[in-house]
Image (cartoon, coloured by chain):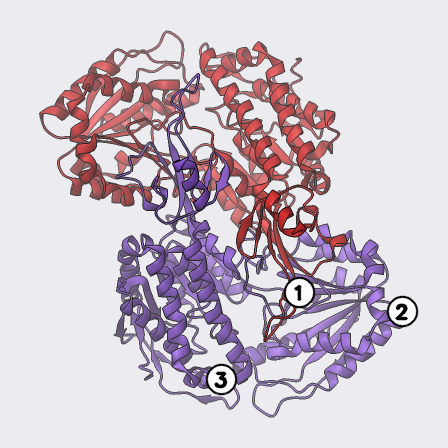
Chain colours: A red, B purple
């Protein structure tokens, strides 16, 4: 595919009338061609207006066409072939194997959402049939369904150029809900974004959809992002990135004449709690797994463990020593951008120079640019509880080992934590009684609890929650990964006493889309409903 | 029951250390005894701390105890007997029949939520079993459930002293979700609030629950309300009232260190669209039904129709004349407070003196105090579209008849509307083709569409949506009436690879609560799941 260096608005290449911005290869700090033209706020309107226009037909699409469209996007992404992996590698410094896995995840979640669209439970149909004989007052026929919110603004994340970017989880779930998407590319991987954007635009065209269903825009820094969120046509926002940027979008959305929901996934320390029983096993293996989770993808994962709570005493000392050895053997990997590497350096320096914090071990710098040496630090739990500086996320391969003596200390530390995406427990059956009281405490702080695994490698399924209380996300009631993510872009509407001719299709008596529907409060499967009607 | 004139915090009478406030009989403007002592912000902390403490045990309650508690509240409210109807009548000026109906609605929705708690679908259990053999990577066992958000602040509404107040829809749905409630009484009906508050406190005690599950507080004006929403222990807010007050709470909630959701139901014009076919029937009956919806409960309903779009031409003229006759025959009914009556007067005066607005008809003042004469005005649709003043809600018995000629005019007018709770169509089969394009336009603006009925009289069921886009509510994704309201107070948590010993009960393999659970993406009924396991 040819990279044009322009935005792709409602199926048209649009040269931005602002400045230009180019991607850089972080392994070499060399600029990548082409430079991308940045659109103005005036030009942005063409994308949001087109999305607004596309809503009527796209939101009413039949399930089969709708699902086929999502599958076509997945097919088109695969059809790009190696070019996508190469370009993404150049723009992010991420290794090919990681990017191949990320591509599989991206196409996999598009196909999973196609299944969700066909299955149809997300439409949330509820029917309370009329009760004309009810006393003292008859009941009207009332039916409910979930409708798509409207055009959604999605922001690409720097750390997942595919799975949390142009056709990533936010885009996939918004499109699955029936919402047109205006996608703001992350300026760190503009070429990757364009390749995937072309794949989506082709699917829109080939399926005969309104071109406004998808636009890909390149804009200057945060200003065009703020303008996008402020645009009256936009009805919801999906974002993965820093806390500062996420909070800025939340403020803009809340200050609108019509406030809109922002789904921002922002920051997390992902604490790991090691219980004594876990130290009776292979401590070296445990240390290596932890270090792998800290350093994988250069630590640039939302779920990298930034805290490890380890028991005081001899067994815990052994674990700390093993962690030190494991991290010392690690070479740095290229980070996503020069800016992110610089930010990691200052964060790690601040942590290392904090009171009562010392180094457990540090690896070596990588051979490429922007590949700082992974570092793991240590402190006592009393210090962690009292020093808020130690609660700051360091984006990249750094972590803090915290030594504790009692469950009460752990509960106190948990109570001081801000909201997190995950918490992990390493334990054996002997530790269950000690660990049990931590579960309800952790439920108040995180979106996912893991036992004897690691938080990285977020499964895309029906039961996944990639979310959590603020500031891990802007909205703890949601997840940005997994099929439940579709619920973020829906709202209920009730229809009272409408004739069949005016009812939306999912609510028709004949149930032509074969939906499972909640009738008088109980879900009735489509097949079963038909039997009841025919009986 | 004896009215104490004090707050009821975690089961204890607490005399407020601030000023006092008393209820007034709006029919006579006489003060009612006792005066209520108002708590300070310091005293507020005892309520929010108790709610915070109560969360752990209340959120984990077994369904049977939980449901029994909700039913006990309903029983205790009924046990108050006539005293409740008399006191509520004195404090609100509402007639006994209306209050009896409201009481039945209040106890009915508590019992409906008890059924929801026993049935358990709101727990949203999802199970993706482990796939140890999956390639390239095995899948861990991942389970999800919805947990209660935490303590909820609920604000009493002036216009529903029972159904949207102490034990109203917000309290019932929050308690059903497993959230302790701190209830801020509306100072217009403090005695009614205390009677119901005592009924709830008795149910808490009799069921052996933590006393912090419910507190009823009296506080000065909005200041204690703002302090309540700002309190870190509070995790969500339920409110029904004015747009100004609702927006103030939204701002406070968004400015917290941890922002929390606010569910505010604020204002709505509830437009009614009359199509030509409907004028071929009994026009007098149509006019009388409309006037009854406008003037019922002195027009102080969230869903009172504030706009009636009627065709231009002779048939529409007949309708307008009939509306004029019907409203002229109406006597005013006492409004809730002297302040609300004064506000109605200035609103009606502003509407009546707006450019190109004239009176269709006006009734007579009522015999009691604060019973202004219901008034219905008229204007042309071009005037409505261009003059934003005509879009202001007038809380009380006033409405505006708008004459239109074409569907295009209606679509234009709909596009200019702010978010609304409801829209109503009056039509016959001959009007379906004309009305059809309005449905998708109205879906973008309202939470409920009604055909050949009236928006007042909101059914409490599974399919009801009492919600809508801002500023009708603060969150279009929700409803404050009906069983879906419980979802407002829940958030998902995922559990990855947890042993049975550490899993919450709803996720146990044995499914002891007999929940319908979504397994691998498909809901499996409890009975069916057992068969599968035993097969």
Of pointers 1 and 2, the one earlier in the residue sequence: 1
Alpha-carbon span between mark 3 and mark 1: 27 Å
Identify the image quadrant of residue A143: bottom right
Numbered marks: total? 3
Q: Residue at x 57, y 29 (%)?
A: A220
In the picture, the disc for residue B313 is 2
Q: Are marks 1 and 2 in contact (CB under 8 Å)?
A: no
| Left or right of B401 in this view: B406 | right
Q: Which mark is residue A213?
A: none
Q: Is residue B43 visible?
A: yes
Closer to the chain start, of discs 2 and 3, is: 3
Q: CA distance from mark 1 to mark 2?
A: 24 Å
| Residue A180: percent from left, percent from top | 65, 37
Residue farthest along the bottom direction in this orientation: B367
Are marks 1 and 2 in one subunit?
A: yes
Distance CA(mark 2)–CA(mark 3): 44 Å
Residue B89 disc label: 3
**Numbered mark located on residue B270 in the image:** 1
B66 lies left or right of A229: left
Judge by depth and name the residue closer to the eye, B109 or A55.
B109
Quarter of the view holding residue B127: top left
Callout 1: chain: B
> Looking at this rendering, what residue extends furthest in the left direction?
A314
* Above or below B454: residue B442: above
């Amino acid at each position: 595919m040819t990279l044009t260096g322009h935005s792709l608005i409602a199926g048209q290449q649009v040269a931005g009338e602002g400045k230009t911005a180019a991607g850089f290869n972080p392994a070499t700090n060399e600029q990548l061609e082409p430079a991308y033209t940045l659109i103005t706020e005036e030009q942005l309107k063409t994308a949001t207006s087109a999305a607004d226009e596309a809503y009527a037909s796209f939101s009413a699409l039949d399930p089969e066409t709708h699902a086929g469209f999502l599958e076509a996007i997945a097919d088109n992404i695969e059809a790009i072939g190696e070019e996508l992996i190469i370009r993404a590698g150049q723009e992010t410094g991420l290794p090919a194997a990681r990017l191949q896995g990320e591509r599989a995840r991206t196409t996999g979640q598009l196909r999973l959402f196609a299944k969700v669209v066909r299955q149809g439970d997300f439409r949330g149909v509820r029917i309370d049939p009329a009760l004309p004989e009810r006393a003292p007052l008859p009941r009207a026929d009332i039916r409910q369904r979930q409708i798509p919110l409207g055009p959604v603004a999605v922001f690409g994340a720097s750390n997942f150029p595919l799975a949390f970017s142009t056709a990533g989880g936010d885009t996939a779930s918004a499109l699955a809900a029936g919402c047109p998407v205006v996608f703001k590319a992350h300026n760190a991987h503009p070429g990757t974004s364009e390749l995937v954007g072309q794949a989506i635009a082709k699917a829109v065209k080939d399926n005969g959809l309104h071109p406004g269903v998808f636009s890909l825009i390149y804009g200057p820094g945060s200003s065009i992002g703020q303008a996008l969120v402020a645009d009256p046509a936009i009805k919801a926002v999906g974002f993965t990135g820093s806390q500062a940027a996420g909070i800025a979008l939340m403020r803009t959305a809340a200050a609108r004449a019509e406030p809109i929901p922002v789904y921002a996934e922002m920051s997390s320390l992902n604490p790991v709690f090691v219980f004594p029983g876990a130290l009776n096993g292979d401590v070296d293996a445990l240390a290596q797994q932890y270090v792998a989770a800290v350093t994988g993808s250069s630590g640039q994962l939302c779920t990298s463990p930034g805290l490890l709570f380890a028991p005081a005493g001899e067994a815990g000392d052994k674990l700390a020593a093993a962690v030190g050895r494991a991290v010392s053997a690690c070479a740095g990997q290229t980070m996503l951008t020069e800016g992110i590497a610089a930010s990691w350096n200052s964060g790690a320096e601040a942590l290392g120079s904090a009171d009562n914090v010392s180094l457990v071990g540090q690896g070596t710098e990588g051979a490429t640019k922007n590949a700082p040496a992974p570092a793991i630090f240590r402190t006592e739990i009393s210090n962690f509880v009292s020093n808020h500086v130690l609660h700051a996320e360091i984006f990249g391969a750094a972590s803090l080992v915290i030594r504790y003596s009692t469950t009460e200390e752990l509960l106190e530390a948990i109570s001081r934590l801000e909201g997190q995406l995950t918490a992990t427990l390493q334990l054996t059956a002997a530790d269950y009684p000690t660990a049990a009281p931590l579960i309800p405490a952790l439920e108040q702080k995180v979106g996912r609890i893991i036992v004897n695994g690691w938080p990285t490698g977020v499964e895309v399924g029906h039961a996944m929650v990639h979310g959590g209380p603020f500031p891990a996300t802007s909205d703890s009631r949601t997840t940005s990964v997994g099929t439940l993510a579709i619920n973020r872009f829906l709202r209920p509407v009730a229809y009272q006493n409408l004739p069949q001719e005016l009812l939306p299709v999912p609510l028709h008596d004949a149930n032509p889309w074969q939906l499972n529907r909640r009738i008088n409060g109980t879900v009735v499967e489509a097949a079963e409903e038909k039997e009841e009607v025919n009986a």
